[in-house]
Image: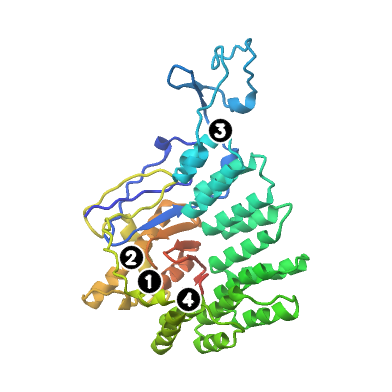
Amino acid sequence: MASMVSVQHPRNPMIFPPESGPRVANTIPYSPYFYCSLQISPPSSLNPSKLKPLCFYAASKASNSTAKVYRRQKHKNPLNERKFNNNDQNDDDPLRGNSSIVLPTVDLMSLCKQGKIKEALEYVGQGAFADYNVFGALLDSCGSLKSLDMGKRAHELLKQSPFAGDIEMNNKLIGMYGKCGSMRDAHRVFDRMRERNMGSWHLLISEYAANLQGENGLLLFEEMKKSGYHPDEETFVAVFAACSSAGAVEESLLHFEAMRSEYGIIPGIDHYLGVINVLGSAGHLWEAEEFIERMPFEPTAEVWRALRNFAQINGDIELEDHAEELLVAVDSSEASADKITLPPRKKQSATNMLEEKNRLAEYRCTEPYRGEGYEMVKGLNGQMREAGYVPDTRYVLHDIDEEAKEQALLYHSERLAIAYGLISTPARQTLRIMKNLRICGDCHNAIKIMSRIVGRELIIRDNKRFHHFKDGKCSCGDYW
């Protein structure tokens, strides 16, 4: 079956025309059951804000005619070059004639709600007025789509707006970068803020926890206290999330005790749930159950649901059944929740999408295991074996022999995406992989070794979280 690949090049799609990008002749066939997407981060030396477009377009709108587009050959933005006045009849600008230039009327909020973020960014870049709510919607949408490229474009436009120094808008920037898995950019925004509020600290700590970099979140908490900020209830919710991400069980219990003794904060249900998540994530199920029994109020459905889920993950069937009974006693609707008929399986197409910066190029291949990408995978596999990699065939569920299982593991989608990125990008450039399924244990071990061999940071987003592979280690600490 044919497969499709789209390649993302480190160029700015808002400036360069689609036909200017280089074409790639490589093809990557793909398994029909899932897909991966590769984002290639642009080099740090490429600053889109410093690049000048070759020309601008201005639309003149008449009352009884359709909009016409005129080309302006100057390098300067006509919107910034001069201000037009309807009463000025002596201007010889050929673009105007006897009337002022009027940009097309667009509803930017509607575009954001429809998911047409690229179009909205293009209109704002051409001079369309964007108010506070529009910029907020743009950043939220970029974070929801996990599109780092469009998020950076929105950031550049925000710098040129009157809201560049607004605290809440910068908080949205931190959240957007965190959701896109770029904590370096999130922390850079935080460092450059002239003023911060408690929400700024809470947001950055929470995003570190969500990206499995809880150690950095805990360090930020200590920095917050040294800066003179007094922790509140929301602070400790973020701190417990960071402890869960870092596996810091003892530290979480110390913070829980300090809430009452040092800060006079009475722990609420969110704080108890935070500690339960820390204990459950670390596999301390007996301690989690004992902690629940000592709660000063009746456990809620969320508490028993969390304990049941951790028991299921760790294979403790007895505790899982016990927590299930208590959960049903609190919330009777949970009794039939697990018996709902599963929806029909979605038909998966044989596509492997390597995202280009907002531009799609399609390549097809009908012969499996051919092309430079597959050759690169084979070469990496030999180096990985020398570094100690041993294929774990338990993750292949097909009834085939061991050799065929090892080959099946070799061509998992994330490995092909990485291989194609390695042959398509300069050395030491970060690769971003977007995967729609949970990464398997064998690929997780293989990519750790691969990151050390190629000397790059490999960021993979599966259906649960971001994995930051660097120097043979993963940010999740091998627990996901």
Label 4 environment density (alpha carbons within 10 Å; few <14, some 14–19, many ≥20): few
Q: Residue at label 2?
A: 412
Kindly check if marks 4 and 1 are in contact, taking CB atoms under 8 A apart as contact: no
Kindly check if marks 3 and 2 are in contact, taking CB atoms under 8 A apart as contact: no
Give how far across and how far down residue 338 sits, in percent. 35, 74
The residue at 56%/59% (across/down) is: 178
Instruction: Between residue 67 and residue 300, name the one nearer to us.
Output: 300
Question: Mark 3 or mark 2: which comes first in sequence?
Answer: 3
**Residue 84 numbered tag:** none
Q: Amino acid at mark 2?
A: His
Kindly check if marks 1 and 2 are in contact, taking CB atoms under 8 A apart as contact: yes
Residue 390: which quarter of the image? bottom left
Q: Amino acid at mark 4?
A: Tyr
Question: Mark 1 or mark 2: which comes first in sequence?
Answer: 2
Whole-angstrom CA distance, mark 1 to mark 2, is: 9 Å
Q: Amino acid at mark 1?
A: Cys
Which part of the image, by quadrant, shows the N terminus?
A: bottom left
Which-is-in-front pick, marks 3 and 2?
A: 3
**Residue 128 numbered tag:** 3
Kindly check if marks 3 and 4 are in contact, taking CB atoms under 8 A apart as contact: no
Q: Residue at label 1?
A: 440
At numbered mark 4, what does the secondary structure look like: helix, strand or loop?
loop
Question: Mark 3 or mark 4: which comes first in sequence?
Answer: 3
Q: Residue at label 4?
A: 479
Label 1 environment density (alpha carbons within 10 Å; few <14, some 14–19, many ≥20): some
